[in-house]
Amino acid sequence: MPDTPEDHLSGFVIAVDGPSGSGKSSVSKQVARSLGYGFLDTGAMYRALTWWCLEQGVDLTDQDAVITTAERFPLSIGTDPDAPTVTVGGTDVAAAIREPRISTNVSAVAAVLPVREILRVLQRRLISKAGRATGGVVAEGRDITTVVAPDAPVRILLTASQEARLARRSKELHGAADAGAVAATRSQVVDRDRADSAVSEFTVAADGVTTIDTSHLDFQGSVEAVLQVVEAARA
Ligand SMILES: Nc1ncnc2c1ncn2[C@@H]1O[C@H](COP(=O)(O)OP(=O)(O)OP(=O)(O)O)[C@@H](O)[C@H]1O
Ligand SMILES: Nc1ccn([C@H]2C[C@H](O)[C@@H](COP(=O)(O)O)O2)c(=O)n1
């Protein structure tokens, strides 16, 4: 019988979850580079679907319309950590999916449970494809350790205090982490996490998931902490 992603994932899978601004995306990408593995940013998939719904004029409060759009979602996503690509219907949306209008609306799309199931199947396929191509993959998001790849040999919850996460995102968006910049960033971190928590648990590690608190680590320290967990799992 042919292998399907529903049966088991191909390659060595490193699953990483965590709240907004914890460093999941940047740290996972660097870990994938270090190991010569693929990298899957599942948040980019939810963002791309949100972009596509808005492009199609779909009312995001109409869950049936969002589900129908997800069922015919012409997504193509690359898993090379040095050249991550996201296209929808042939349009490069890598920059557009980072715009505030997407960040503001993505949680509404991610809250639709049948949409999550559609993306889960797609994500397992992408993980297996990347795993076959490079021997392994680092996949990050909010439900990778628990729902998408609970069978991964390495599962990590990458976290940090709210203060640290706000400061990081604030520096990234506004170039500073003073009170004004942090206040301007708060909704992007705190409100989005609150909305996303309704459908995924990404603040408390599930059984068998290793928590790495990066509050007092710099970027390289966070990468090394993840690599140590990977090494221990392989020993
Ligand atoms: N340990 C760290 N110390 C300091 N800055 C960090 C650390 N890890 C990541 N950063 C920086 O914090 C910012 C947020 O990181 P990143 O985008 O990877 O977070 P994320 O968890 O993927 O967030 P989101 O879920 O909102 O996309 C980036 O500018 C990144 O370079
Ligand atoms: N596995 C995932 C990944 C992402 N989401 C949702 C929740 C986020 O608000 C949004 C964008 O993700 P980000 O780019 O900030 O990592 O996508 C999810 O529900 N499950």
Image (cartoon, grey):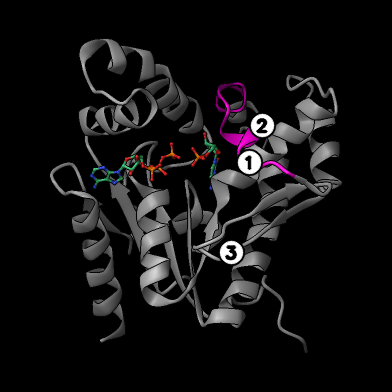
Which span is picked out in magenta? 92-105
Where residue 79 is drawn, which disc sits there?
A: 3
User: At 86% from the left edge and 46% from the top edge, which residue is drawn?
Assistant: 72
Q: Are marks 2 and 1 in contact (CB under 8 Å)?
A: yes
Q: Residue 97 magenta-drawn?
A: yes
Label 2: which secondary element: helix
Q: Nearer the viewer, mark 3 or mark 1?
A: 3
Residue 101 or 203: which is nearer the viewer? Answer: 101
User: At 22% from the left edge and 33% from the top edge, which residue is drawn?
Assistant: 164
Q: Amino acid at mark 3?
A: Thr
Q: Nearer the viewer, mark 2 or mark 3?
A: 3
Label 3: which secondary element: loop
Question: Which residue carries the number 1 mark?
Answer: 46
Q: Earlier in the sequence, mark 2 or mark 3?
A: 3
Residue 141 or 55: which is nearer the viewer? Answer: 55
Question: Which residue carries the number 2 mark?
Answer: 109
Label 1: which secondary element: helix
State the CA–CA distance, disc 2 to disc 3.
23 Å
The quadrant of the picture occupied by the N terminus is bottom right
